[in-house]
Amino acid sequence: MLIEPRVLMRRVKWMFAGFDKPFMVIVFLLLCLGLLALCSASINAPGRLEDQVRNIFLTLVLMWIISNIPPQTLIRFAVPAYSFGVALLIAVSLFGLTRKGAKRWLNVGVVIQPSEILKIAMPLMLAWYYQKRESVIQWYDYLIGLIILAVPVWLIAKQPDLGTAILVLSTGLFVIYFAGLSFKLIVPLILALVIGVASLIATKEQICQPNVQWVLLHDYQKQRVCALLDPSLDPLGKGFHAIQAVIAIGSGGAFGKGWLKGTQSHLEFIPEKHTDFIFAVFSEEFGLAGVLMLLFLYLLLVARGLYIGANGPTLFSRLLVGALALSFFMYAFVNISMVSGILPVVGVPLPFISYGGTALITLGIAAGIIMSVARQKRLIQT
């Protein structure tokens, strides 16, 4: 039985009704730029580009599925997802797989990294909690929120995985702030951070001595911070990444060396050039003009996400989408800052640009949730 063209078009249109067009266009453009950069970064690694295309296809499918799930259904997964994620983190600490000195993975037939679950489960859980307390939020609710946040962050930092811990922590803090936490309470923390950084810079020659032990930080984390403060302390070791990345960024100039013509990346001076340091490859080949275009796309992505969140029909939607939108900012800010020598090197990918399946799927799920709220808003209006 043939379907009339108008009926078929109506059905196809309904299938993609969950996609917020401006938001999806921005994500699509970022994915295209990512494939361009990855093609250059992986020119000597056949098959990597094809793998990323498959990752993108899977991500788009998940994004489409989640964008068509109502937020009222998503809220039911908040507590189970958080509880399941924390349980897996505890299992990792007890009998996880150790690779390169870090215990971050769990073998359940396939190898998984449970900390990725918390990037979505944490804002879901906190948004659910404040939705339940919407009409009676008291000062101690913010304390309870911090406790809910602190448990998985501590378990992730203990693995150690500082990059993921920072992302989970920041996303949770965004939810707590949007729930009504006074900015006056945040200012002292910012001042303490500024004073701490200034103290590190002033005393770097003393505290970076090999015989000096840092409290709460592993040796490799201390070495990364010291390499940030002064890469010349270990130019062929921990400082090598930062030095070569900054050289690549600077050598791009105003308009770059051209696609596939980056010397720093093709001569293998940039480590992890297809994942954490892909921004250096992009900057060298497309220059300042390309970087400004990339930053503009991230600005549009975050702005559109915040706009969708601000117009969410429920407190749960507004808190969740606002935090997820700003998580894109944190991803980009931390990655670009570490590649540019502003922050220590941590394992944070450049959103929708870096190679990788797990991180890309996590970002796609976040994008799908944002578009789910946008779809609900359109349905209410119509």
Image: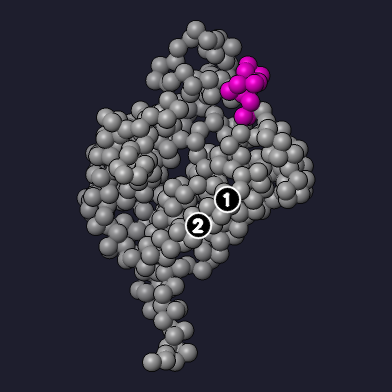
Looking at numbered disc 1 in the image, what kind of residue is underneath it?
Gly
55 over 246 or under it: above or below: below
281 over 308 or under it: above or below: above
Does residue 373 show up?
no
Q: List x then y, in percent, for residue 57.
A: 49, 60
Residue located 55% across and 46% down the image: 354
SS for tag 1?
Answer: loop
Q: Which mark is residue 47?
A: 1
Residue located 62% across and 18% down the image: 234
Residue located 54% across and 13% down the image: 208
Q: List x then y, in percent, for residue 284.
A: 71, 42
Looking at numbered disc 2 in the image, what kind of residue is underneath it?
Arg
Q: Residues within 10 Å of mark 1 (few under 14, many from 20)?
A: few
The magenta region covers 230-242
Q: Which residue is mark 2?
A: 54
29 over 154 or under it: above or below: below
Judging depth in this view, the residue of 309 and 76 nearest the camera is 76
Judging depth in this view, the residue of 60 and 129 nearest the camera is 60
SS for tag 2?
Answer: helix
